[in-house]
Image: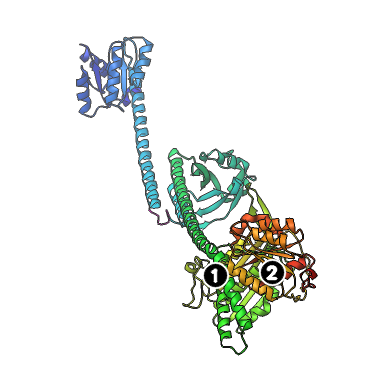
Amino acid sequence: MGTVGHALSHLQIVAYVESAEANSARALIESLLGTLTVKVARTMQETLEVLGGGGIQGLLVFLPGSEALDRISALRARVLDMPLIAFTGTDEDHLGFRAIDAGADDHLAGRMLNPEDLARAISMALARARSREKRKADAEKELRARQKRLLRHQDLLKALAKHEGMGSDDLRSVLCAITEAATQSLGVERASVWVYTDGRSGIRALDLYEASTGKHSEGIDLAASSYPEYFAALETERTIVAHDACHDPATRCFAESYLRPLGITSMLDAPVRVGGRAHGVLCQEHVGPMRVWTEDEQSMAGGLADFVSLALESYERKQAEQALRESREQLYQAQKMEAVGRLAGGIAHDFNNILTVILGHSAYLNTDLPPDSPLREIASEIFTAGQRAAHMTSQLLALSRRQVLEPRIVDLNRVVRDMEGMLCRLIGEDIELAMEPMARMGRIMADPTKMEQVILNLVVNARDAMPDGGKITIRTRNEERSVDLPNGARENKNFVVLSVIDRGTGMDPSILGHIFEPFFTTKDPGKGTGLGLSTVYGIVKQSGGDLSVESTKGQGSVFEATFPAHALKLAPVETPPPVQVAVGGKETVLLVEDDQQVRTLTRAGLEKLGYLVLPAQDIDEAVAHCKNHVGVIDILVSDVVMPKASGPVVAERVRELWPDVQVLFVSGYTADALARYGEALSSGMLLGKPYTVEALARKIRESLACAGGYLSPRPVDQSRA
């Protein structure tokens, strides 16, 4: 029987024989293999019952021809791991191949059984069965390990989903939790989150975690130009699976500078997408023997990358929501400013006309009353109240950016220097005023009187923040900034910055958000109007600048007004001594004013100063004066907005008759109301209402002087004598 047959002597097998010679088959097998026990079954059912009884190590199917094939398939489906040998009793080779395809471990052909062939077939079938069992056991072991890994990964993902930072502004803590989870889930040394920098010119590490040290770091930059192969792989938006990182085409560029020095052998980098586009990458780096990344591990890396995407999207959504809230708040503030501006602009013209009359008549009373008259004090109080009302109207127009400005090229250093004495008296002896002007300062285009108001209000605000004394610093400097252009490009431009710094009480964020609002004040009732800083804000904005503030409770505040630098570079010049401008004169003034009270007051005041005044309420009366007056008309003083024709139209018509006449416009309207007249107003000077007759007379002399006339009264026109 030989050694093979001896090795099978203690086995029990089933012989499935669908013929009358079942007993002969058993006797034949036992005679061939000695003590091997054979149980014979004649039907499929009987075969299954014998197999179900246990103790059977093999199955031998005796069937004639192709009838065996269906039985073999059915039996293999019921006994997956048992050795199964088919004997077809023919010499047809194709039946053997088909039997094996049907599930047999081996096939014996021919009319006669050879004991060595049978023993060898059974032995090999048993070996294959044991191999199948081992593979099955190994597969089950791997499946259990895989399930364990997946459960651990799921637990980590659940913990990440419940992380308190998820959905908040605390992006860093979430990313730290994700990188730590990556090292635990995938068993790697290093895990990191990177995002693209501006223009996708590189990536920056938001967090890099080292498991062995437990340390997190950030801020590392990688330039795309230095590692083109890796960035090309990133752009495919597929996971980079580098089993051998030092030789993988995508990652070998890091070999000498990064991988080998740190002992990194394998990398698994999953793309992070935000808004449907690659936004960055989650990197896993293995230290030790080269590692082959399984599909499960690649899937795990993708799941963790999805959490990074969620964290980034949530953070960016929070940032966008915050920006939206801020923009809504800014819109609300702008609408509030617009409402105040509309109110101020709506009443400005009529109110300024009324104030002109009040100021003018109270000034006349104060001048004409005897020095010892008790009514002089009353007249002075009326004049003071009128000035306060005029100042408040000016503030309302300033904060709504509707006041009339007279911009010119301004040296802020000179403005500050000229105000130094007055500011020192204003802040008191217990506060030190430090001036830090920058040499060779740029110039700005602004209204110098309004710049004085900006400085004054900021210094007063700083003084009020230091009730126990301290130091106020006024600093100027040039600054170059990169600004966005309409075409999307960026350009460096020059700016001039005015800073007012105090070391006072400071402000907390809740106050900082409201300090530029109209009527907002932290002062006690009756000690502030709440218009100071809002006026500054309006003037700076209307002048094309920006106003910012930084403040810390208990440490003081820094206010900075930033203006575009004017292209014209002016050499420092000394301030000329003030010229004493006379207010009286002998010239002829054509006065066109639709408000009867203002017209009457202005005529009386100018005539009192020696001028000949031709009053007109509209363009028709003005033209009539031009045609009928005997003598020269020196200057036209005209309101801007009038029923029949505007001031510029009146000026154009008058100059048709008197080409050399000078023009001075007066108006109580706001800047935006006058903006529609555009270049037409450039034909003359402009004086805002309310005004005093003295201020008007000085402006008349100024206008005449610009035309080559006289600052002092010229000789009397003999044609009027």
- The mark tally for this picture is 2
Screen quadrant of the N terminus: top left
Camera sees residue 271: yes
- Percent x, y for residue 478? 69, 64
In this picture, is 411 found above or below 91? below
Q: Which mark is residue 551?
A: 1
Residue span colored magenta: 162-167
Which residue is tagged 2? 613
Q: Which mark is residue 285?
A: none
Separation of residues labelled 1 and 2 (CA atoms): 56 Å
The answer to whether 477 is drawn above or below residue 124 in the figure is: below
Residue 133 highlighted magenta (yes or no): no
Report the side of 713 relative to 334 (left or right).
right
Rendered-image quadrant of the C terminus:
bottom right
In the foreground, 233 or 284: 233
Of helix, strand and loop, which one carries label 2? strand
**Against 111, is 470 above or below?**
below
Residue 241, given in percent of the width and then of the height, sits at 51, 40
